[in-house]
Amino acid sequence: MNPSCNIYQKARNSKGLTQERAAELLNISTRALAGYESGERFPPDHVVVQMLDIYDTQVLAVQHLRQSAYLASCVIPDVPDLCLSQAALTLIDAIYDFADDKLDRQLIEIARDGIISEEERPQFDRIVQKIGAITSAAYALVYARQDGRE
């Protein structure tokens, strides 16, 4: 990630707020906000909760969780900040890609005996990777911007 435009700065910029105005609305100093946006400091959860409301973005919550806890970064997929139309098309494309490759049928065959053999492992890993793309796209749709901004 480019530290000169991290997730907090991107969220603020997408709302069209200056650092000064955002800091005022967040009831924090401009210096504190600058520290969060430069990556010098990590914002506490209660400040991020305010950012979600003031910046009108829910995807920031997922992005913040992924950055604040190693475990979260391991189990929560990376969720892109997309507008509704981009998110919907991305999800549909990921689902069609999975279906076109008949990965659902292959997963049934692999899972039928409850064991992933060494021969099945590469295909199973590919299936899991494709499911990860679908999951990320689904989260992007859930948290999609609905204000028409691209």
Image (spheres, rainbow, N blue to C red):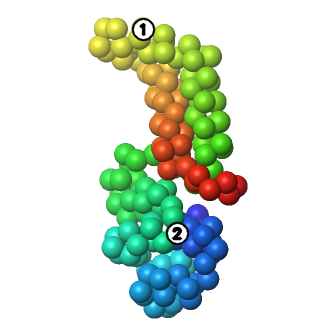
Q: Quick one: label 1, few (<14), some, or many (20+) residues within 10 Å?
A: few
User: Which x, y percent locates residue 93?
Assistant: 64, 30
Residue placed furthest toward the left = 114
Give the residue at x 67% y 54%.
148
The answer to which of 3 and 118 lies nearer the viewer is 3
Q: Is residue 38 visible?
A: yes
Label 2 to label 1, Cα distance in Å?
46 Å
Answer with left or right where residue 107 lies relative to residue 34. Answer: left
Q: Secondary structure at mark 2?
A: loop
Which image quarter: residue 13?
Answer: bottom right
Indicate the amino acid at tag 1.
Glu
Indicate the amino acid at tag 2.
Tyr
The answer to which of 39 and 64 lies nearer the viewer is 64
Residue placed furthest toward the right = 150
Q: Is residue 67 visible?
A: no
Answer with left or right where residue 63 lies relative to residue 146. Answer: left
Tell me whether the residue at label 2 lies in contact with that at label 1, contact meaning CB atoms closer than 8 angstroms.
no
Question: Looking at the picture, does residue 83 appear above or below residue 44?
Answer: above
Foreground mark, 2 or 1, reads: 2
Give the residue at x 38% y 75%.
47
Return the residue at label 2. Answer: 55
User: Which x, y percent locates residue 39?
Assistant: 50, 76
Residue placed furthest toward the front = 147
Return the residue at label 1. Answer: 109
- Which part of the image, by quadrant, shows the C terminus? bottom right
Give the residue at x 53% y 30%.
130
